[in-house]
Amino acid sequence: TAGVEAAAGTVLLGRYELGGLLGRGASAKVYLARDLLTGRSVAIKSFPNPRAGGDSGEDRPIEREAAILRRLRHRHVVRLHEILATRKKVHFVLDLAAGGELFSLVDASGRMAEPMARHYFRQLVSAVRYCHARGVFHRDIKPENLLLDAAGDLKVADFGLGASSSDHQELRHTLCGTPAYVAPEILSKKGYDPGKVDVWSCGVVLFVLAAGYLPFNDASLVNMYRKIYAGKFRCPSWFSPPLRHLVRRILDPNPATRIDADGIMSHPWFCDGATDDDIVH
Ligand code: ADP
Ligand code: MG
């Protein structure tokens, strides 16, 4: 049954007690909720039920996102526990990322010191590599979709634009992503390798974390796309030489020569100071 009013001011959704709004995206609203059986907090992502509009078919975006999430089980990917459907809504019960957005950790100048950026970038790349190995591509990696759990560990969220290797055509031809994070080959509409596209967006995230501003930016979208196309950007003076090198290897406009996830993992900047993991938290 749909949201039942329990005690005054309490909304129940099955065994979950709904709390406040955590965030909203283009497709859904996300609420804090408590599992009354276990006492644990969860996040509930609520979509309008497409069936309410008489829509049908296997490739509805919500079904796709659900199918993708069901395949993934990784410490740095938000996990789907169950799906509840009411007449008007579909609710995903998800791991709660209680620590908010990764970007809340930037300092007053809007950035992170390199060791901290490396710590989270490693977690991001481990999640992305895992997804790719499972045949899943996120295609919308950007700060709003990178959250933190209560322990301060990264959780990749929002596979709403995700695709799996069984999606064939869709996988390589859909125009998707967010302008500042989109790889140049997506803009050229000739088909792309979805893995290389995720690597590119990870590179933009890494740049933003360590620089405090976007590598490709312009008040005009056309000019921004031109810069992305040309791979034209400048690293700030404070980037270390190995970080500059890695960022250049990732933000290579040619996907054929761009470094891949395995390459990133053996890059000197990525491997530097293997004990960095101890310095955060
Ligand atoms: P959309 O597909 O509409 O973009 P998202 O899945 O990105 O929706 O969720 C929207 C926002 O809700 C996120 O940017 C984040 O702030 C918040 N959010 C999403 N999932 C969680 C979660 N598991 N825990 C905490 N907050 C979340
Ligand atoms: Mg989102």
Image (tube, rainbow, N blue to C red):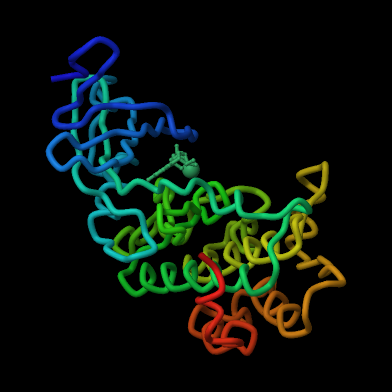
In this view, 258 is above or below 161:
below
Please count the marks in the image.
0
Q: Position of residue 89 (x, y in %)?
A: 27, 25
Q: Position of residue 69 (x, y in %)?
A: 29, 54
In this view, 235 is above or below 240:
above
Looking at the figure, which quarter contains the N terminus?
top left
Q: What is the residue that sits farthest to the right in this orientation? A: 237
In this view, 249 is above or below 40:
below
Q: Write the residue at 37% across / 59% down.
A: 77
- Residue 72, by quadrant, is bottom left
Q: Write the residue at 68% across / 63% down.
A: 112
Q: Write the residue at 21% across / 18% down.
A: 3
Q: Position of residue 124 (x, y in %)?
A: 49, 67
Q: Position of residue 186 (x, y in %)?
A: 59, 58
Left or right: where 204 falls relative to 222: left
Q: Write the residue at 20% across / 13% down.
A: 7
Residue in front for this viewpoint, 81 or 149 = 149
Residue in front for this viewpoint, 224 or 189 = 224
- Residue 208, by quadrant, is bottom right
Left or right: where 33 falls relative to 216: left
